[in-house]
Image: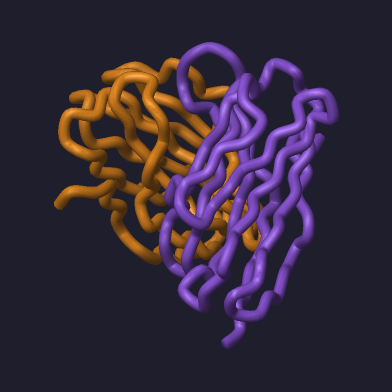
Chain colours: A orange, B purple
């Protein structure tokens, strides 16, 4: 596809479980971003990858959150020991180098029950 | 700490009218101010953006007005249409490089026929 693809679209998990959220960026985009959008709020920055490395992970809320991008393309956001407060829409975006974020993926809606 | 303040939270405009959304910021290190449009179930999409060296930017029916001294900027949607009904986010990015964007809290616009 031409856009950023995120899977799954929805994820319901029980408190304490582990979840993985996947992002397929636009082909050739070296920069990849994860943002989190809570209900009624604007997106908040979580982490930025340039290639395979996390260049800025200052937005990750705590050490339960981790993200990887091993081959410089697909990225996985991993959340351990999920809490109800982790419920949100997790958005991914990609860009050429440090270019403008024109489009985000449709997001993964995570619900922790 | 909310670095980009946005108002109003919601807005109802008649078809053909002008929609106005206002934002203010504190951090003078911000050098790029995008606006995003988000439809339900979709990720945000870049609508229009401005840099602080210009006071106004127009693209079709969408205009950004920028007041650097007041640290305020606004989005005007002329001839508003029902298809413009969406949530709009103002945002800001700091000088230098990658897209670590700070978003406002959003304005839900409803354009009624």
User: Residue drawn at (54%, 62%), measured in percent from left and top?
Assistant: A112
Q: Nearer the viewer, residue A32 or B34?
A: B34
User: Which residue, as the protein is rendered here, is positioned at the far top?
Assistant: B96
Q: Nearer the viewer, residue A43 or B22?
A: B22
The image shows residue B4 at horizontal and vertical percentages of: 74, 38
User: Which residue, as the protein is rendered here, is positioned at the far right?
Assistant: B70
Number of labels in the image equals 0
Q: Is residue B59 positioned above or below A15 on the image?
A: above
For residue A61, say whether it is visible.
Answer: no
Q: Quadrant of residue B91?
A: top right
Q: Nearer the viewer, residue B99 or A110?
A: B99
User: Which residue, as the protein is rendered here, is positioned at the far bottom?
Assistant: B113
The image shows residue B27 at horizontal and vertical percentages of: 76, 22
Whether residue A69 sits left or right of residue B83 in the image: it is left
The image shows residue B38 at horizontal and vertical percentages of: 50, 59
User: Residue drawn at (24%, 49%), measured in percent from left and top?
Assistant: A3
Whether residue B23 sits left or right of residue A68 in the image: it is right
């Amino acid at each position: 596809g031409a856009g950023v693809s995120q899977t799954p679209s929805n994820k319901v998990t029980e408190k304490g479980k582990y979840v993985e959220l996947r992002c397929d960026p636009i082909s050739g985009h070296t920069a990849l971003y994860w943002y989190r959008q809570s209900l009624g709020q604007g997106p908040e920055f979580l982490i930025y990858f340039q290639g395979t490395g996390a260049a800025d992970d200052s937005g990750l809320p705590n050490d339960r959150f981790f993200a990887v991008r091993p081959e410089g393309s697909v990225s996985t956001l991993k959340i351990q020991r999920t809490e109800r407060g982790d419920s949100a829409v997790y958005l991914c975006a990609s860009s050429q180098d440090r270019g403008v974020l024109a489009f985000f993926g449709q997001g993964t809606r995570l619900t922790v029950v | 700490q909310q670095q980009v303040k946005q108002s109003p939270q919601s807005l109802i405009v008649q078809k053909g009218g002008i929609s106005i959304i206002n934002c203010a910021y504190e951090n003078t290190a911000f050098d790029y101010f995008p606006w995003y449009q988000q439809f339900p179930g979709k990720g945000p999409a870049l609508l229009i953006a401005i840099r602080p060296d210009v006071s106004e930017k127009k693209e079709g029916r969408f205009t950004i007005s920028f007041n650097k001294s007041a640290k305020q900027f606004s989005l005007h949607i002329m001839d508003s249409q029902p298809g413009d009904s969406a949530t709009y986010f103002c945002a800001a990015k700091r000088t230098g490089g990658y897209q670590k964007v700070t978003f406002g809290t959003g304005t839900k616009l409803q354009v009624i026929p």
